[in-house]
Image (tube, grey):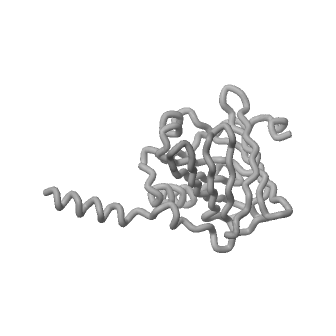
Amino acid sequence: MASLRALLGVVLCSLMVSASEILPQADFDLQGVAGKWYLTGVCSNFKWFVCRKANMKSGTVMVEPTEDGSLKVASSHPLDTCWKIETLATKTDVPGKFTFSIPFTGFVTEMRVVDGKPDEYGLNHYINTGRNETFVENKLYGRSLDLSAEVKEKFNQLCLQTGILPENIVHLPKTEECPLECFV
């Protein structure tokens, strides 16, 4: 019986794709990601997320490519007040792969743009390392808050492929945007 369980464990582990095997989109277009996006889905097994996922809502993200090929990213999420984060996602040698850190989190993040259509949706994969741990998360962005069932299923499959438990896949409820002055 123990041998059967061990074999089953090996088989299940071999079916999961490691985070390092999630590649950026082959035809990544830096200018195509520019502009306004809505965060509509998040998945992660990270304890912070699991404890707060029930209260999360959709957010707004503004992306601006820089001259050197990096991305200025400003995101806001309505909580009790407008919560805003700005960061510079620095380009790497691989198109569609960026790195950044948000100082108060203690994590360095590798971001990979893995799928999308510039006028419809984007799927990003994140590997977060810091505080003696590493965790992955995936995010679904849309040019609108209403994405097709097909796009939502692509997101679900990416989450499962990267080892996220089904109960930790969240399609965020729509909410009012934070005021534009949040982005100033």
Number of numbered labels in the structure image: 0
Left or right: residue 173 versus residue 7 is right
**Could you say where residue 35 lies in the image, as x and y percent from the top left?**
79, 54
Left or right: residue 142 versus residue 44 is right
Residue sitting nearer the eye, 108 or 62: 108
Look at the picture and state if 50 lies above or below 12: above
Residue sitting nearer the eye, 44 or 33: 44
Residue sitting nearer the eye, 4 or 103: 103
Q: Residue at x 66, y 58 (%)?
A: 121
Q: Residue at x 32, y 61 (%)?
A: 12
Given the current orientation, which residue lies at the most extreme top position? 80
Instruction: Pick the quarter of the image with the C terminus.
Output: top right
Given the current orientation, which residue lies at the most extreme left position? 1
**Could you say where residue 148 lies in the image, as x and y percent from the top left?**
59, 57
**Could you say where residue 145 lies in the image, as x and y percent from the top left?**
66, 48
Instruction: Pick the quarter of the image with the N terminus.
Output: bottom left
Given the current orientation, which residue lies at the most extreme front position? 132
Given the current orientation, which residue lies at the most extreme bottom position? 26
**Could you say where residue 141 lies in the image, as x and y percent from the top left?**
65, 53
Look at the picture and state if 94 lies above or below 152: below
Residue sitting nearer the eye, 173 or 125: 125
Q: Residue at x 64, y 73 (%)?
A: 26
